[in-house]
Image (spheres, rainbow, N blue to C red):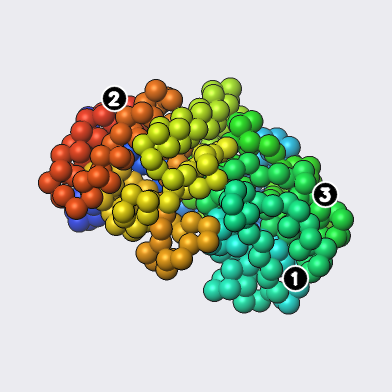
Amino acid sequence: MSDPYASIQTVDPEIHELVHAEEKRQADSIRLIPSENYASTAVMEATGSMLTNKYSEGYAGRRYYEGQDYIDKIETLAIERAKALFGANFANVQPYSGSPANQAVYVALAEPGDTVMGLSLPFGGHLTHGWNVNFSGKFYNATQYEVHPETHIIDMDQVREMALEVRPKLIFAGGTAYPRAWDFETFGAIAREVDAILVADIAHIAGLVAGGAHPNPLPHAQVVSSTTHKTLRGPRGGMVLSQEGDHAKAINRAVFPCLQGGPHNHTTAALAVALKEAAAPDFKDYAAQVVKNARALATELAERNFRLISGGTDNHLILIDVTPRGINGKPAAQALHLANIECNYNAIPFDTRKPFDPSGIRIGTPSITSRGMKESDMRQVAAFMDRALLAAEDAEQLAAIGNEVAEFCSAFPAPGVRIR
């Protein structure tokens, strides 16, 4: 096979070598980081196209630069596909990523100092939902709800009581380490009761929503924000959707000109491709399989005495307390890495350890599902993880497990990986 990166090799051999190494790592590893996935070759070709050369400040039909004949059509395609896929009346596909998308929501729908509510970061929420070191916690009066101390599931009665007490302008429903389904219907009812705007951040579950494997927040949420990669398998970008016409103009103004200049047209085109892929019938099979694999993996891990937060999963991710196995999250993640198994260390609810050395690890099944793994393969994945943690201080044994993992992965070609 010819080298798809030959031009890079000619211009910059150092970068060429690193790209090759990373692609091989992605081919040889069981990638369990739930925010990662494999984009298709088509999505990556659009991302690397000549569209990166074009400036397009403004929106389709209202640009500040000439030569937008094809750019306008590309962005319009992405918008219409996003609206159709998620059942929205409005879509902005220009945010550079998920955090800028959420920032646009704040700018559009709230004023600095307004009260906002979101799931607390140590309990599975996201930085932009009001955490104190983030802009959302610095410029807004953020109130954080948590999970139940015993079940580790969001207590909707507590959410309602908090909302009635603080009367927030915005309520965020969404997170990065919450393994259960989001009750958007009840969140929507609470938001209406306190005259708040419900913002569903579906960055992690967008692909599951698109594929019918998780409830759609629309029409319960007036606004939906998301990244465009993760379970959706698109490029690294963001988008904002809405059912409310009066929010559309404010969101557009917040994205441009308030927060951003010209959109990344190559990303917009890649998103359009990914949205077309997500509308295909086989994407529903993929989304359903992500959840099936996560549940099967959770069962296998529980049988090997892994402590699963909330007892399991309803979506694509699993949060694990590894301290009962005599190890903390960070060294556990590092040991797994040496065995060619990628995850991230992560705080667990009510964690007594520091965030940079927490008690848990976070894993997920999007990437391995994209490779074609099924429920029956989760037994081997769990066995590799179990063996790696048992050998956490034995580099030689971890390397041997890593070789077995690479051999195991060779039976499941990774989408978009073009070198070996």
Residue bearing the label numbered 1? 115
Give the answer, above or below, for where 136 lies relative to 315.
below
- Which residue is more in the foreground, 217 or 86? 217
In terms of image quadrants, where is residue 184? top right
Graded by Cα atoms within 10 Å as few (under 14), some (14 to 19) or many (20 or more), the crowding at tag 1 reads many
Mark sitting on residue 76: none
Which residue is painted at 85% across and 60% down in the image? 194
Label 3, label 1: how many angstroms apart (C-alpha)?
18 Å
Q: Earlier in the sequence, mark 1 or mark 2?
A: 1
Q: Earlier in the sequence, mark 3 or mark 1?
A: 1
- Which residue is more in the foreground, 126 or 90? 126
Q: Nearer the viewer, mark 1 or mark 2?
A: 1
Give the answer, above or below, for where 375 lies relative to 405.
above
Q: Amino acid at mark 2?
A: Ala
Q: Secondary structure at mark 2?
A: loop
Which residue is painted at 46% across and 66% down in the image? 352
Whether residue 358 appears in this view of the structure is: yes
Q: Quadrant of the N terminus?
A: top left
Q: Quadrant of the C terminus?
A: top left
Residue bearing the label numbered 3? 189
Q: Amino acid at mark 3?
A: Ala
Which residue is painted at 43% across and 25% down in the image? 375
Residue bearing the label numbered 2? 411
Q: Secondary structure at mark 3?
A: helix
In terms of image quadrants, where is residue 11? bottom left
Graded by Cα atoms within 10 Å as few (under 14), some (14 to 19) or many (20 or more), the crowding at tag 2 reads few
